[in-house]
Amino acid sequence: MNTLNLGLDRAILELRKYFREKDQVFFSFLFPIMLLVLFSTVFGDQFKGSGTTAGQFFLPGMVSAGILLTSFQSMALTVATERDDGTLRRLRGTPTPPTAYFLGKVGLVAVTSLLQMAVLLTLAHFAYDVPMPNSAARWGTFLWVFGLGVFCGTVLGIAYSSLATSARSATAAVIGPVMILQFISGVYFAFRDIPTWLQQVASVFPLKWVAQGMRSVFLPESMASEEMAGVWELGRVALVLGAWAIAGLVLCLTTFRWTKRGSD
Amino acid sequence: MTAITVRGLRKTYADKAAVDSLDLDIGAGECFALLGPNGAGKTTTVEILEGFRARDAGEVSVLGVDPGSAGLAWRDRVGIVLQSSTGLDLLTPREVLRSTAKAYRRPRDIDEVIDATGLTEKADDRVGRLSGGQRRRLDVALGIIGSPEVLFLDEPTTGFDPQARRDFWSLISSLSSDGTTVLLTTHYLDEAEHLADRVGVIAGGRLLALDTPSALGGRSEHEAVVSWDEGGERHQVSTATPTAEVARLAERLGAEVPGLTISRPSLEDIYLSLIAPHLTQEVAS
């Protein structure tokens, strides 16, 4: 049984666990989907005559929130919990290669986030008439922003889990920053409505750039003028996300521990 | 052949020695029980041998390898039953065992292990719905699924009912007679007496006594107490020659001796007398 097969097997086990845990399914998988339904319904009238619909306006944000929740939040919470409850320690006591464990996590995030995207896009298109990207170039942008975003979230989530001293403290340490980050990164409302200093804070983190990249995919070209720079800045999106991906991977590999702090 | 060798092992936490100059040799195929009160250093010792904890001084070897720097090939030969493990609640015993078995080169048959640990009826229930004793048996099942050459059992039967404990004992006995080296820590003296070839008593991080259960602390040399009923009263006599004493009684009373018992100090009596000085020390400090 080689590492790749073990990783695949772990991914299946991780998926079983994920979909049996109702909290996880609700707060990471269904949450952005429900918000899309809620926002499209509540704000529907306000977008009449604006050239776009509530569904189209909120879809990029919900896509970005979905990426954040299924990668960063899900990893930070589950790895902290597994470290606290001894799951990692038990694995460490078996001949399971660490790579197989990480492959299992990657598989879990890949499947849940892709599935979530499929539901979000299908719902947006068929229930709220949101036009899907009309060119190969836009689909291409969607794929690399999605891929880089999920990768950043996964490695940063695993690295972030080391900050928590227990599963209980992890919930507070993760959910709070994740909520705030979503509000200041232009996920729930237009980024231009946020004060400049908060925009600058948000620009440090990857979520703002994921959301910007997703707006370039789903919004009409004319709306680029509402961005901070007046254009989509895809080059900069790639640069910032790429840098976070590398930094995240290094952090993840250097800070990872199998047991709680103070237990060696 | 020794499976486990410990020389001058030392581990301190904030200036307090949890384990101090511990020496130990456990032979291949032996079942060894480490006894001691809470905080004696049992778990620290076992965790160092399992490769989970770093040591401050001393030499340690398990299957010829230093656990502190051992790799996955060594993990393949060692089975570990931790003191408690959670985090499996959403899976079933069969799912957890199947996935764990895949990591080993020579895994045992999953159904056989489920059967041997008495989990057949619960194999497809969520672990979260198992009782404490059933969970413990799953921990044991996870420890033996890889056909280990050395098995570490840290207080394996805590929370078992008497029948489950008996079943567990026969499982460990059969592993032991198949040649598996077993290192067991326990609070239960009857467990050590039943399973172990040799017993080590540890307190304050030091080994106080090391012998077979029947000889521990000079137990086999203690005088035996012969008791019987005669004339409506209980009589007893301490003697070094209980067989001769019983023969004399049988002759004098002319038939079955009423209420006859012959007893030596129990392992528990010996154990308590060994650790008593360390307990008062702990209270004093």
Image (tube, coloured by chain):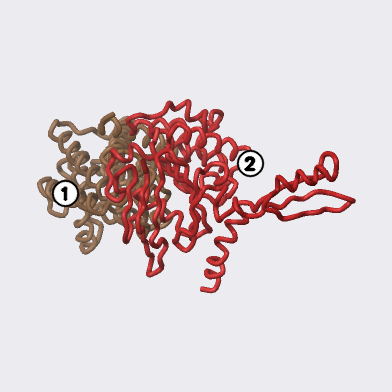
Residue B227: mark: none
Question: What colour denotes chain A?
Answer: brown
In the shown orientation, is residue B272 left or right of residue A76?
A: right
Whether residue A237 is visible here, answered yes or no, is yes
Q: Which residue is mark 1?
A: A246
Chain in red, by letter, is B
Q: Residue at x 14, y 31 (%)?
A: A136
Left or right: A198 as drawn, with respect to A167? left
Q: Nearer the viewer, mark 2 or mark 1?
A: 2
Quarter of the figure that contains the N terminus of chain A: top left
x then y, percent, for residue B208: 49, 59
**Quick check: A191 above or below A147?**
below
Q: Residue furthest bottom?
A: B284
Residue type at mark 2 is Pro
**In this figure, which residue is indicated by the disc labeled 2?**
B162
Q: Residues within 10 Å of mark 2 (few under 14, many from 20)?
A: few
- Pick the front one: B186 or A7: B186
